[in-house]
Image: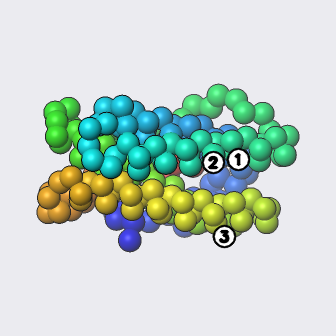
Amino acid sequence: MLNLAEPTREEWFQSIEDNLDTILIDHAHLEKRAASTALSMVFRYTSRPGLPRKLGLVVQEEMDHFVRMLDILEARGVELRKVDPAPYAGKLVKQIRDHEPAKFLDRLLVAGLIEARSCERFSILAEKVDDPDLADFYAELFEAEANHYTLYTGMAREYFPADEVKERLAELAELEVEALKAGRDLPRLHSY
């Protein structure tokens, strides 16, 4: 369903569970970045039919998730501070081709793959965190991220031929795994 080339390794949760507060801080920052990504596409591709409204709603939802993450951090007595991000998204963004319309296709698919990995990670967190409220929140986010993945990949199929989307998505999915592995020893939402 999510077109991930490899699932999260079994040991991922054990590698981050002692750093859950850092994961929550990282997650808050990722929600801002997801909103920023969608908003930047609204600015750049505003003339694409349907795109401004669809991605405008994503911006709103991602910012709602950010505010809710702030509430979670506050309730846990954790200060939102700067943390170095995993190299994951940066490495994926470098795979985006620099000429249009290929750049547009890649931006949609990279955003979709990041949402897919987040969706998978939220499912793991919902199952394994020992805080019932946090587990419920992650179960809710699992569904939201799955919807975002479907939206981004669906938009790619709306604007580009299905075969081209399928081929490029498969290529980027392989590169997504390599990007994930680059954060091997870093406790982050998008670490290996």
Q: Is residue 42 above or below residue 9?
A: above
User: At 49% across and 48% down in the image, what residue appears?
Assistant: 57
Residue type for callout 2: His
User: At 78% across and 62% down in the image, what residue appears?
Assistant: 133
Classed neighbour count for the residue bearing mark 1: other residues with Cα under 10 Å, few (<14), some (14–19), many (≥20): some
Instruction: Indicate the quadrant where residue 156 lies.
Output: bottom left
Relative to 78, is 96 on the left or the right?
A: left
User: At 70% across and 55% down in the image, what residue appears?
Assistant: 17
* SS label for mark 3: helix
Distance from label 1 to label 2 (Cα)?
5 Å
Q: Is residue 185 visible?
A: no
* SS label for mark 2: helix
* Residue 64 locus on image (x, y percent): 63, 46
Q: Is residue 160 visible?
A: yes
Residue type for callout 1: Arg
Determine which residue is flagged by label 1. Answer: 68
* Residue 182 locus on image (x, y percent): 43, 43
Q: Is residue 117 above or below residue 32?
A: below
- The label shown at residue 65 is 2
Relative to 125, is 76 on the left or the right?
A: right
Determine which residue is flagged by label 3. Answer: 127
Distance from label 2 to label 3 (Cα)?
19 Å
